[in-house]
Image (tube, rainbow, N blue to C red):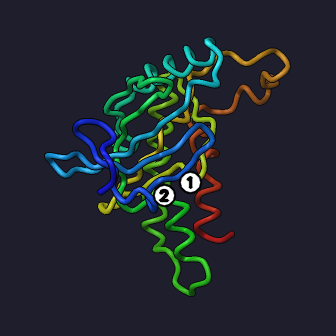
């Protein structure tokens, strides 16, 4: 156990569990009374403009409305000094990238049914986001997590509300006819290719 983070949480294995992301740092914390583990994401606001700071809180507000078994649960968000704190669900098997890396250099392959199950869960999470006009902007194995029950948890804190694209980035009429159900599928293809080592 490390030093007290909040009155009811303590750092858990801070040296091994702390990682830095593009937006800030991520800590593994443990509730003092229940012993349950959570992820605490800390995003510094001191170097952000007032507009970007407001956007960060708006993003958290949008994401807090998501509820799906394959999307990490957001338990709360608050400001502490110049830091935005986001308390999230902890997935005890780590990221899909970690799982893939553990197989690198070995002769053992992933079970095909497990791969298909992961893919279905990822697509299900993306469909739920798209249904609320939320677009994930950094979908990769490092942002998809697994629990010991083999449940996929797509990290929600890197998604943003979808806005109409500027004219120069809009799809051509032929591309606009693509069925919307294919969008989550196409987003998930890289995971299947990575796992299958294609």
Task: Say which mark, if any, is on residue 142.
Answer: 1
Q: Residue furthest front?
A: 3
Distance between the Cα atoms at labels 2 and 1? 5 Å
Identify the residue at image location x=29%, y=47%.
10
Using residue 142 as the reference point, say whether residue 156 is left or right of it: left
Quarter of the view holding residue 97: bottom right
Using residue 11 as the reference point, say whether residue 35 is left or right of it: left
Q: Position of residue 81 (x, y in %)?
A: 45, 23
**Tag 1 or tag 2, which sits nearer the N-term?**
2
Q: Position of residue 56 (x, y in %)?
A: 54, 22
Residue picked out by circle 2: 95
Helix or strand or loop: what does disc 2 sit on?
loop
Between 162 and 84, the residue placed more toward the observer is 84
Using residue 126 as the reference point, say whether residue 34 is left or right of it: left
Quarter of the view holding residue 92: bottom left
Q: Residues within 10 Å of mark 2 (few under 14, many from 20)?
A: many
Q: Are marks 2 and 1 in contact (CB under 8 Å)?
A: yes
Q: Position of residue 88 (x, y in %)?
A: 37, 39
Identify the residue at image location x=41%, y=25%.
80
């Amino acid at each position: 156990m490390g030093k007290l983070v909040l009155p009811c949480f303590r750092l858990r294995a801070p040296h091994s569990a702390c990682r830095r992301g593009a937006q800030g740092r991520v800590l593994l914390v443990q509730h003092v009374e229940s012993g349950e583990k959570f992820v605490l994401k800390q995003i510094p606001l001191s170097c952000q403009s007032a507009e970007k700071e407001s956007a960060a809180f708006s993003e958290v507000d949008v994401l807090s409305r998501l509820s799906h078994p394959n999307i990490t649960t957001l338990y709360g968000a608050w400001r502490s000094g110049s830091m935005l704190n986001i308390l999230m669900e902890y997935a005890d098997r780590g990221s899909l990238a970690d799982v893939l890396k553990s197989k690198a250099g070995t002769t053992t392959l992933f079970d095909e049914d497990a791969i298909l199950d992961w893919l279905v869960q990822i697509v299900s999470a993306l469909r739920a986001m798209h249904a609320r006009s939320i677009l994930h902007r950094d979908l990769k194995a490092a942002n998809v997590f697994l629990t010991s029950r083999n449940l996929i948890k797509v990290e929600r804190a890197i998604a943003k509300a979808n806005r109409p694209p500027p004219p120069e980035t809009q799809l051509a009429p032929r591309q606009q006819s693509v069925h919307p159900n294919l969008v989550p599928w196409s987003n998930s293809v890289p995971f299947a290719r990575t796992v299958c080592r294609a």
